[in-house]
Amino acid sequence: MAKGHSVYRCTECGAEHSKWAGKCDGCGAWNTLVEEAVGRTTGPARGRKGVLPASPPVRLSEIAAGRTPTRWRTGIAELDFVVGGGIVPGSLILIGGEPGIGKSTLLLQCAARLEAAGVPVLYAAGEESVEQIQLRAARLTEDAGRVQVLPEVRLDAITAQASASGTRVLIVDSIQTTYTDELEGAPGNVGQVRECAARLMRFAKETGTAVLLIGHVTRTGGIAGPKTLEHIVDTVLYFEGESSSDFRILRCVKNRFGSVDEVGIFQMTASGLTPVANPSQTFLAGRDSGISGSAVTPLLEGSRPVLVEIQALAAKSGFGTPQRVATGLDHRRLAVLLAVLERRAGLRFSDLDVFVNVTSGMRLVEPASDLAVVAALCSSLKDRAVPPDAVFLGEVGLGGEIRPVAATERRLSEAERLGFRQAFVPARGKLSTSIATIPVAHVADLARRLAA
């Protein structure tokens, strides 16, 4: 195939345009046209008779069990857990996160352990020099001296070197700095990012090389580049964490070779990232159970229950409009819960500043934590601490009712393991657990119990 021309395709409706425009004529969306390379074939046209696929179709029943690829374990327990037990040969993994969160550190540690296990690794560095990477490697507990580092941003040069050196795992840092000469535009634009990711996917499937990409995130928290970048890759991992906290959370949002929504917990230290074996105990280590406005809830991150502390503070407002500040919780969800407490439980927050914080950098996504947020708010308003050995679990409806949540028994088992003796749970549903349960049917009922 000779080098061809480019077309512009809309990421929303898929319409094809011969030149770039700010608005798609097909769907009317703005800034959705991305450049795609189109090659000119020298042989028969695509779809003509006589053109056969490179390999014939195979029945799934004819595939021998021994052909199933064996995963490569990185030796980093939390990373292996999140990706489903290790890296699958021929897979394409995308790791996104904010600058300085620890993406490069994690993959350098991963490369060092894979090399020690006999898996050849090539680290293609597009953002740092070899000397800078060596300074980072000197801080790590792992010995990264055998890792091959290639300071290169040209995609063809990277894949050629990976093929020539027998690389089994290719790390590209980052996809935003990689480019191909067949597309116009600077590295990092939408067309370059999408085309490079697609070619790396083909390279991974054809050679059996596992490719790990580092991707930057935008201001909204999404991976920079078109949304189709996440559809191209096999696995998408997000590295999260507060800049003021040492804890980092590796969250899986897509995985073709394992379960999604799994999380791995790391702690950033002077010698690199250290896996946290017992996240619940670590997150609750600094908790003061004798103060008001504190409640504990068992979250379910993938298949792993994790206990976190929710802190709330309600204070008289010094301004005309009360403040509503939430860290680790959607501020819109906080507004809903405050409205439910005002209307259904008769608790007044309209003239108070309300601050809610989820400790250790965790984020409340599932509604199962609603009851704990409500308990922390009631505790702060009445200035009375909740029982120190209690956890709160339940979803709060707009009518003030407390609704059951999934995997309640698994969550409560984790709470009991850490020494909690009672749990405020929805009145509906039957539970088979040894921890003492206190059924709560309505937010007004919870407010009365905590004020008693």
Image: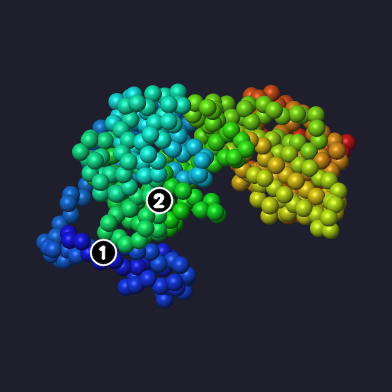
Q: Where's residue 45, x and y in %?
A: 16, 66
Q: Is residue 98 visible?
A: yes
**Which residue occupies the foreground of this view, 161 or 126?**
126
Residue 235 seen in this snapshot: no
Question: Within 10 angstroms of label 2, few (less than 14), some, or many (20 or more) residues?
Answer: many
Q: Say the numbered circle drawn on residue 142.
A: none
Q: Residue placed at 40% from the left, 73% from the top?
A: 21
Closer to the camera, 404 or 40?
A: 40
Where 91 sits versus 332, above or below?
above
Could you tell me residue 35's position as x and y percent? 35, 64
Residue found at the far front of this picture: 131
In this figure, which residue is indicated by the disc labeled 2?
176
- Name the secondary structure under disc 1: strand
Q: Residue flagged by tag 2: what amino acid is it?
A: Gln
Q: Position of residue 207 (x, y in %)?
A: 24, 42
Counting from the top left corner in percent of width and height, residue 308 is at 65, 35
Q: Which residue is mark 1?
A: 38
For marks 2 and 1 on the same chain, the one whose residue lies earlier in the sequence = 1
Quarter of the image where the C terminus is located: top right
Task: Tell me the residue at 55%/36% (across/down).
Answer: 248
* Left or right of residue 293, residue 54 in this image: left
Depth order, front residue of 164/355: 164
Looking at the figure, which quarter contains the N terminus?
bottom left
* Spatial CA span between label 2 and label 1: 21 Å
Q: Quadrant of residue 182?
A: bottom left
- Residue 111, quarter of the rendered image: top left
